[in-house]
Amino acid sequence: MGCLQNKYRDTKLTDMEILALKDKHVLPTPEVLNSVLHDSYPAFEEWDNVLSGLDIKPEWNYYKDGNAWLCKMMFKKKNLGWIGVFDGYFKVSFYFTEKHLNAIVDSDISDTIKEDFYNAKPSGRLLPMTVAVTDKEKLKEVLPVLLFKKNLK
């Protein structure tokens, strides 16, 4: 993956990340996920177990607009967020509106995730909170976000 030099600061920006699972004919089975996620697959399995324990159903669909498989995390009829799979890791994304900002400030969500959230570019009227997961340790930071989103009215 190439890097772009930021002309205003002495830091590098990575090129746009590319979702894996691009073939609509290859379902995201455990075997396929393991082959793409590599060392982060145990974290993915653990996250799947967390979702199951909270009665949250993962729904995999192939989306033509992004030409990739994504997983919705559904609690009853409520979409809590999305899982996107990349080479060697996965991202869990949650979307909020401006009316949730005060509640997020007072939540148990880690300061690091909150800071990234406040600096994230909005997606229309929605504000994305995205966490890249490479190991089980990172799930400890994602779980409070999931519980917060699940309990939102």
Image (cartoon, rainbow, N blue to C red):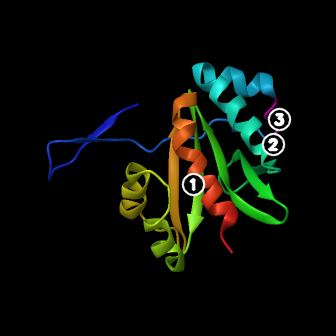
Residue receiving disc 3: 27
Residue nearest the viewer, comparing 2 with 76: 76
Residue at (20, 42) in percent of width and height: 11
Say which quarter of the image contains residue 69: top right
Instruction: Give the alpha-carbon distance from disc 3 to disc 2, as whole Å.
Output: 20 Å
Residue 76 is left or right of residue 4, and the answer is right
Q: Secondary structure at mark 3?
A: loop
Q: Residue furthest bottom?
A: 99
Number of numbered discs: 3
Type of the residue with mark 1: Val
Closer to the chain start, of discs 1 and 3, is: 3
The residue indicated by pointer 1 is: 145
Which quarter of the figure is the C terminus placed in? bottom right
Q: Give amino acid for label 2.
A: Ser
- Residue 81 visible, this orientation: yes
Q: Is 54 a magenta residue?
A: no
Badge 3: residue crowd in 10 Å (few <14, some 14–19, many ≥20):
some
Q: Is residue 86 above or below residue 107?
A: above
Count neighbours of disc 1 (C-alpha within 10 A) and say few if under 14, some if 14 to 19, many if 20 or more: many
Indicate whether 37 appears above or below 103.
above
For badge 3, the amino acid type reads Leu
Q: What secondary structure is the stretch in magenta mostly built from?
A: loop
Percent x, y for residue 139? 57, 38
Compute the Cα span from label 1 to label 3: 28 Å
In this figure, which residue is indicated by the disc labeled 2? 52
The N terminus lies in quadrant: top left
- Answer with the quarter of the image where residue 149 lies: bottom right
x and y percentages locating residue 58 in the rendered image: 79, 47
Residue at the image point whose x is 66% and y is 25% from the top: 41
